[in-house]
Amino acid sequence: MFLCLGVSLMAFVLTHVVPGDVAVANLGDRASSDPVAVRLYREHFGLDKPLPVQYAVYLGRLVHGDLGESEQSRRAVRTDLAEYIPATAELAITSMVLACLLGITLGVIAAVRRNRLSDQVLRVVSLGGMSTPQFWLALVALYVFFYRLSWVPGSGRLDAAVQPPPRLTGLFSVDALAAGQLDVLVNSVQHLVLPACVLAAFNMGLFTRFTRSAVLEVLENDYVRTARAKGLPELTVVFRHVLRAASPPILTVVGLAFGNVMTGTVLVENIFSWPGIGQYSYRSATALDLPAIVGVMLFVAIVYILVNMVVDILYGVIDPRVRLA
Amino acid sequence: MVGFVLAASWLVIALLAPWISPYDPLAQGAGLYQSPSTGHILGTDELGRDVLSRLLWGARISIPLAMLLVGLAFTIGGTLGGLAGYLGGWVDELVMRGADFVFAVPTILLAMAVVAALGPGLLHAVLAVVLVSWPGHARVVRGLVRTTMQSEYVAVGRLLGSPTHRALAVDVLPNVAGPVIVLAALETGNAILLLSALSFLGLGARPPAAEWGSMVSTGAQHFEAWWIGVFPGLAIVTVVLAFNFLGDSLRDAFDPKAIIKARGA
């Protein structure tokens, strides 16, 4: 709650104090040279009032769930967000699942085979994932898999000829499955694969590195030796004993990595014409659309807090000591 | 080792660019869209400029700026984090809550908002990246300072009445330097990524400047001529990879646990 207030205040002050002229940015050249148009615009969005008043008005609306009106789309920011969030959610969740599965598995392999060839190879792969600009990776992936090989459809969430499935969650693949429209499901998954993989690359590298060091730390413990001495199969030792003990730090990183995903979506969505929050925030930021920017920031901050709250709860599930404390 | 060699060679390239690049990076003399050949090893772009020369000159933009902004972010974040860790109390509370706010908003959103408000341009982009990256340094330094503070020699120093700035500089700083260097290496890589991303979005370097991010963005508009965008991207990858390798091996050299703990992870 406190954090939300802080984020909204920071975003608000930041975007209002800076010297850019909002009216000029949004009205276009002709209209902004007309003083009457500028004055009407300012009055409509309450920009003629002093800053503290603007913030108080904004907060007053906020507690009613009203994020204001986007200066670009001329719709309620809440309506805009509701439209774009599912697209980003579908992309972000898919990429997080991919990154977790791959990153944690590879990290375990690297730790178990420490300093051998596979560890060295994985080191290059994971650091490579963390070192590659996502916008560049997205372009190269598009060039190779769409332009050259035509393995995947280009941009967007569905082919132009395909009708979106009836809205249930807004996640096309889930909705299509629920409606039993297999062709739509296949099409949406085809569109989803490439951007999700590109988005997953950075976090996959991050998770691999962290899993490796967390697992290495646990592997030194006596109880691991005991488990091995008992004659347990190595797979059981690693996945039942070691990975469980190593998971709290991994979880923390996964929670923090949601921020990376949002950064990635701005770039990836712009390149793949994915109609989500990332594209929306880019459009709003370049147009200085203040209510939209603050709305997106607030939404993302809330998601970030929720994700990290879930992570805290999961600590207790994994580690009984946390539950008691 | 690999990281060190790679990073060093990029530094040399940045220094020597005017002498080793075969053409003027802004000269539009050659034919347009020439694919890589012996005359133009990496081809020419949509205005007939030599891609290799632009790429080499680009090192003079990305690398010094990344170092500048990591230096700035560290000075701000390190000082605030050091004070927060040393003084505790309301200073700690204030700095850390401030850091939390920045952490809760994805870096690029905040950076985009700042740049959009100030107007696009490389320096504004640098400012924006500094603004979003100081909390990372502040957190690490605070964590390290707090750990060091619990050791007895700092307590002795305090008892003997050494002033805050002296205690921080003489007793605490040498003991946190190692992990901080590692962090700086890793952060330099991230800074280059974020800065080039802003340029890619058209919020950083402006044409005709030979900046890697904006070169990739040009390449995105000329898909058939893949060399325009692919090579500058590769340049970013190798530079960032160099700093990440460097940080990774330095981390193994210093105490790895200290850093992971201090990063809050």
Image (cartoon, coloured by chain):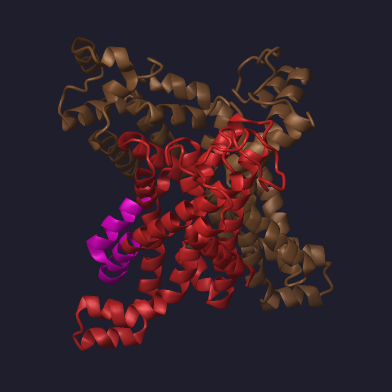
Chain colours: A brown, B red
Q: Is residue B163 above or below residue B142?
A: below
**Residue at coordinates 70% horizontally, 75% vertically from top-left?**
A223
Main SS of the magenta part reads: helix
Q: Is residue A322 visible?
A: no
> How many marks are shown on the rendered structure?
0
What residue is at 28 percent from the left and 71 percent from the top?
A: B86
The reply to whether residue A190 is visible in this rendering is yes
Q: Which residues are magenta?
A: B76-100
Residue B48 screen position, x and y as percent? 58, 36
Residue lying at the far front in this picture: please name it. B29
Which of the two residues, B116 or B199, is positioned nearer the viewer here? B199
Estimate the x, y position of residue A275 in percent, counting from the top left.
Answer: 55, 24
Q: Whole-percent x and y of residue B211?
A: 49, 45
Considering depth in this image, is B46 or A224 the residue closer to the camera?
Answer: B46
Taking the image as shown, residue A171 lies to the left or right of residue A18, namely right
Residue A267 rendering spot, x and y as whole percentages? 54, 37
Q: Quadrant of the N terminus of chain A?
A: top left
The residue positioned 25% from the left and 69% from the top of the image is B87
B238 with respect to A42 (left or right): right
The magenta stretch spans residue A92: no
Left or right: B84, with B230 as reference point: left
Q: Is residue A21 left or right of residue A303?
A: left
Name the outermost residue toward the left. A50
